[in-house]
Image (spheres, rainbow, N blue to C red):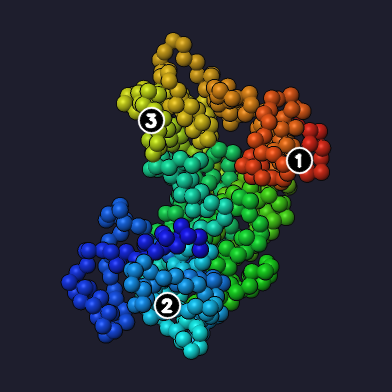
Amino acid sequence: MPSRRREAHARTLGTARRLDHVSRHTRDRCQGVVRGEVDAVVLDLMTADDDPRLPRPVPLSGSARQPARVEVFGYPTSDHTAAGVWRDFEVAGVVDGEQYQLNWNGAGSLPGHSGGPVVDAKSGRLVGLLTAGSQAGRFDRYLPLTTLLSRGVLARLPWLMEGDDAQGHFTRRSRGHRGQTSGSSVFTGRWAARERIHDWLVADQAPGDVLVITGQPGAGKSAVLARVGLDLSEELSGSRGLLFHARQATAADFRTAVADLTGAADDSGPGQLLAGVDDAARGQVGDRRCVIIVDGLDEVPDAKDRRQIASQLTQLARRPWVRAAVATRWMATDPFAPASLLREFGITSARARHLVFLDAPEYFAPTDLAEYTSRLLAQEGVKYPPPSNRAWRRYRSDHHLRERLAAVVAQRAGSNFLVAALSASRLAEAYRVRDPRDADFDPAKLAASIGSALEAFLDGHGNGALLRGALTSLAYAPAAGYTDHAWQAAAAALGYPSTSSPWTGSDEATSPTTCYKPQPTRPASSPACSTKPSSTNS
């Protein structure tokens, strides 16, 4: 575990040693530990919610499988520094059906580690409590959280969030934010879609299909699904759940996440995963329902992996204890064309019972878009808004002005939340306050599509020409993306200016720009500049 993580966990797990707010009864019990009279102490500790100076608790692991390596923390009696001591172990396997054995690698645990936290060495999440050990046998044992859950000691385990920046992605989108913006929620409306998704995922009788959420780019697929998913993670306290961000994922990544959710022993292939899911379900008691949510299936780079994930999700949804939903674009000229990604889920028309088409009238309310636009004009929910001499300050203080402008922006955006967000953000950051009642106000200058919104952004940016060249050339990139040198060469070939790269030497992907790997817009074998960028839904 990196030193920073070690220090963070040491501060968090060692809070008991430094707190002054411990009851007299608890102090007496702590003294009993020193005298060796008892082997456990239950402390009611203050948290960062009580005092921001305190560290936040170590997050619990939601995985039904145990990690390969763990780290144990405690305060051995031989340590007089009160700093705590870490030990790391390999997980050998389960014993007595409930505990897991840890083999010593050199140094083992010490008196004072007993009852301490067992942390996944990779994720830093808590997976169990150290319970017993043998110095002669050179092993320890720990009780996993899954056992504590089944015995009623824990009320619930958190839902899993897996995939590319999954925690940040689902949190931001559920609040109506797209980029790295932090702050309170600006999510607005979409009540019909949210209710449909919610009812599908909590249905007593298994639907048997994957609910597909789709719409035009910018319709808010990720936001709606993330909002419902995080709400359900609190509502369904007795169920297990997985929120999987599929961007840049492989089919193997998805299998691993499902196996962690269900406890399947083997995820080496599709057949092995499904057999493992069934075996694990047979061994469970009580509510064994699993909710599986996948966002951004269209962002899986490899077409074979996309099809395999869709197939696995479809097969899983047929299990009586599984409820599943996916948000994706259709990646074809028509949503219901034979080549559409929706076909992988058996959707051939807008009448499919397991389809939520966000652009359909029953799922879109113009007032929702106007309210969302209004919040962005006032920079509500933005933790660090632009300087106070920008237009957003006036929009925030003048409700009637803000509502007038939001109505016009929303009308121009049609049913596209992304277009409205781009326009509203640009207006909020501008120096000049715009009012639809002004004689020189021209609504036609407001964006009516993602393309026009991007053009307006580039036109108003100091390096707009440079950015336009970089983005245009990027549209020709294969799935693996560009190296810096190839990117510059493509921009130059298209007649756009480019700057020399600050990175020198190898032509490999070593700079921040080459870490961006877009979806393919043409076959990878095509010449770099032989075709125009695709204008399809991909």
Q: Where 345 falls versus 62 (above or below)? A: above
Report helix, strand or loop for mark 3. loop
Q: Which mark is residue 130?
A: 2
**Foreground: disc 1 or disc 2:** 2
Residue type marked 3: Ala
Q: Is residue 38 left or right of residue 451?
A: left
Q: Mark 3 sits on what residue?
A: 378
Q: Which of the two residues, 127 or 333, is positioned nearer the viewer here?
A: 127
Secondary element under disc 2, as helix, strand or loop, is: strand
Q: CA distance from mark 1 to mark 2?
A: 54 Å
- Considering every residue shown, the one lying at the far left of the view is 24
Quadrant position of residue 263: bottom right
Question: Which quadrant of the structure image shows residue 12?
Answer: bottom left
Left or right, residue 213 beside residue 59: right
Residue 454: image location, x then y, percent: 58, 28
Give the mark nearer the N terminus: 1 vs 3.
3
Q: Secondary structure at mark 1?
A: loop
